[in-house]
Image: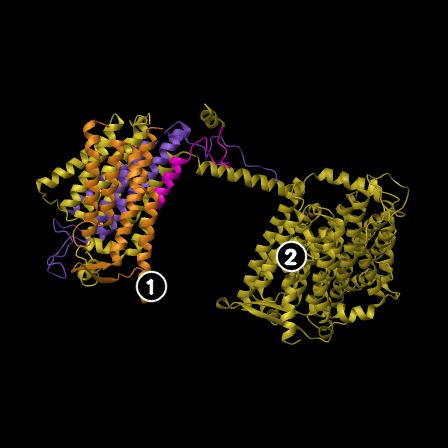
Chain colours: A purple, B yellow, C orange
Amino acid sequence: METILAFTVAVFFAVSIYLMLSKHIIRILLGVAIFGNAVNLTLFTAGRVTRVVPPIIPVDLDTPAQATANPLPQALILTAIVISFSIFAFLLVLAFRAYQELGTDDTDGMRVAEPKGEELPPLGY
Amino acid sequence: MAADGQWLTFLALILPFLGAAAAPLLVRAMGHNAAWVLALVPGFIFYHFTGFLQPVAAGETISGGYAWIESLDTDFSWYIDGLSLTFALLISGIGTLIVLYSGGYLKGHAHHGRFFSFILMFMGAMQGLVLADSFLTLFVFWELTSITSFLLIGFDHGREASRRAALQALVVTGLGGLSLLAGLLVIGGITGTASLSALLAEGESLRGAPLYMAALLLVLGGAFTKSAQFPFHFWLPNAMEAPTPVSAYLHSATMVKAGVYLVMRLNPVMGDTLAWETILPAFGGATLLVGTLLGVRQTDLKLMLAYTTVASLGLLVMLTGFGSKVAVEAAVLYLVAHSMFKGALFMVAGAIDHEAGTRDITHLGGIGRAMPITFAAAVLAALSMGGLPPFFGFLAKEEIYAGLAHGGSWGAALTAVAIAGNALMFALGFAVALKPFTGERVRTPKTPHEGPVLLWIGPAVLAASGLLSALASGLSHRFISSPMASAVAGEPVSVSISVVPHVGAPLLLSALTVALGIAAYLALERGRAAMAAVLEAIGWGPDRGFDQAVRGTVIASAAVTRFVQNGRLDVYMTVTFIILAAALFVPMIAFGELPAVPELPLLPFYEVAVLAIAFIGLGAVLWARDRLTAIVSLGIQGFAVAVLFMLLGAPDLSFTQFMVETLSVVILALVMTRLHLSPADHRPTDQKLLDTSVAVVCGAGLGLMLLRVVQVPFDGTLSAFFAENARVIAHGRNIVNVIIVDFRGLDTLGEIAVVMIAGLAILALVRIRPGAAPARAPKLPKAVEEKLEA
Amino acid sequence: MRTLIFRTIAPYLASLMVLFSVFVLLRGHNEPGGGFIGGLIAASAFAIYGIACGVAPVRRALYFHPMAISGFGLLVSGLSGVVSLFKDMPFLTGQWAEVHILGLAVDISTILFFDIGVYLVVVGAITSIALALEEREHV
């Protein structure tokens, strides 16, 4: 199963990186969203995979009766999902506001901070 | 000196900084008369250090200090012997007069308080520099003098020339400071000591060390830049952009002598070698000649004085490095004499400028009757500078020739240099002291009259002390010259020269100097024209070189920035991911860590189906023709991942993922419906090819890395701990939730803080409208602004 | 989006979801669930309500500003960690107490309050984001 998941992760990463290499903010954002999933899956797979048994202790026992799925990566991923969602929302709004202000979603056109053909810094004192 | 003295000395070291903090308030309260109060600071310090004269004259040295950084074995410590004491007295004594003088000179200036602050800070730094014992204290104060000097030169920061001069001084002396630091580290490495007092006993081992030459060159790099030795002399005349009190104090009497101080301090340790006795006189002599010749060219009183200061510094370095005891005595005498007469002359130049409105010597004449006290002070100072009896400068000049006399042909050559230099300095000194005051009255921008007491007290006191200290030469030798010369020579020296001329070679040479000086004075106009022609012919100097270096640095860094930071996000991303791919593959291949070829397992059909749905979703995102399809496809791959989590025993993750994907699709839809964009790929084919290969290689690398990770045995200690203790310790059966809220609660606290901050940031982004933009919004390019207005 | 059926059913749907989210939050310690998931469910509820009936009713229903709720949650979480400091234990060590309400033994813990704080932060922040974006539609 891990082998298959590793392959899946590779595909997720490849697709998200391809999207992020685009010049269009929207495609970059889509890439970022997929990238989050890819990273979560990587973490999940690295913690090894078991089928079906969730990490929950039965009511009448103090420790799990049988081998369960690894709880640690799950805990890490759970918070990661919520945070990556927050960041994604932030990026989305940022991109939207940038589009409103600059009238473009092409990163080549977004050059307020690094304008094209910028003059030399002052050469005097 | 008991513990009391230790405390007082420490107070003396920090008092200038306290004064600097109080100065602006005092000026606000009292105006320019605050000078009288602030002068108490250096006055007290001067008084405190006179208390050391007696024990130091008796051959004692005083050291003290406090532990500074104990873990690094570094002390804040001081060391007082003849050399540092003389410097401390000069700094505080002249400092007192300078504070008074600047009270009159800058009267009514908008930033008068700031000026007092700066000058007191400088005083504290200089004081600390000459009294420092540990290398670290020395270096810190050394750099502090550079910084305060930068602030003072650039005091009039509205003018470009000031800014340039300040920056130039900072760059030159700052680089020198780094060189000094390296030199001190090398010395510390050779001798294992970190303080000057301990170093004085390590001369033998230092001179014999193979790294001696490196240490010497590095230390001299610091000393020569600070003391404006050729070819680093150019910053000093430019520093005359500073207000005149600064020029008088920093750039003649004190700071520029820091390099000389360092050379003198190290003379007993590093001196007495061939390298020392060649490099120092050679550079010193060259500086003496260059300084005086360039000085002849000037018409500005301050610049004339500045170049003679350069020359004098050269003379001092030359004498210190000459290697005979008498030469050291000469250096000591000349240093003291120079501080007095040059400080006085600078203040005179400032007073003339202040009263007559110009300091161009060709536009001045006959103002002596209007400014009699200033005139008298100028003449007295010039007489000392010219080396005429019965002034302190005369003692110095006699000793110079006596000291250089016993050196064979090398000595003879240096004597010739000294005579030429001294004669020109004689001419320049009298040009400053006589030309503006005598002759026919020339119309000046302002009608000159004697300035207030604050303006003339400084030069008068300094000029008079040049006379008195020579008349009472017994006293001044006993308390000042002899202890200082002993410290510089590293062995007991007794200075005995007095104002009564002894007929001999030195007197004859002095007479020759004076004769040549008078001739040069009379021919000054022609000399100026000749030098101007020569300089025009050369055309290039280190000063212009500095400009070219600065321009070159700026242009080169702009070019590098433009190349590295070209403003194209896709280029940044491509480079980042190429490096990522390299970071993944290069170590994996180099260390033979590629994963083994795995067996393909057989999956249940529903897992295959879920994976297939995920891939279809991904593909649809890539090839979607309109934005809604892309958003929905994004949701599809997300839900597929959620199902995957469910199938693999992670219900919590699955629920969370479902909710998040739903919300993502909703907010994406909310935003995207208002963006008039097509999500389709517009890249040209070759770009697509490049991006695809980068993406595929990166993806493959990450996949292979993961495969390799799962092929090593799994260490389940941590997971097992959580599983065993979730219920026992934390009373929870959902292990994942227990980890989140209990075992790793602090992480979670941080994470919810991030969520909240993201919420706040989004709210801020949505709320900020173009119309309600904050007042100090960054300036947008024209095209954008036009668009916004439209 | 604002069909009659949707608009009619949305308030009920939303309140059911909020109720469910509280249930998920409280059972989270022993069964799948917890503050993060519960918070997301509640936030979706408000988002749906907002899409269906407009933002103003949601703001009225919430009474407090969503970011205020979020900040309050962070405060609750932080304070629940402080309790253990009074017992000379490290920050955020769980404290348990048994409380009898109407003869029923109920376990109360600082952990529970921590999780409630997480819930409130997530609800507040994400509702705020969703509402801010929905509001812009009518600007």
Compared with B725, B363 (above or below) is above
**Vertical order, B414 against B753 (above or below):** below
For the question of whether residue B595 can be seen, the reply is no
Per the image, the residue denoted by label 1 is C85
Please indicate whether residue B507 sits to the left or right of residue A99 in the image.
right
Q: Is residue C81 left or right of residue B312?
A: left
Residue B51 locus on image (x, y percent): 72, 71
> Secondary structure beneath disc 1?
helix
Q: Chain of mark 2?
A: B
Callout 2 amino acid: Ala
Looking at the picture, how far across and down is residue B514, in whole percent?
86, 55
Q: Residue at x 65, y 54 (%)?
A: B25
Q: Is residue B755 rendered magenta in the image?
A: yes
Q: Nearer the viewer, mark 2 or mark 1?
A: 1
| Residue B749 relative to residue B775: left or right | left
Residue found at x 81% / y 45%: B355
Evaluate if marks 2 and 1 touch, with contact meaning CB atoms under 8 Å apart.
no
Of B310 and B534, nearer the camera is B310
Instruction: Determine which residue is flagged by label 2.
Output: B22
Q: Quadrant of residue C105?
A: bottom left
Q: Where are the magenta residues, as a range?
A: B753-781
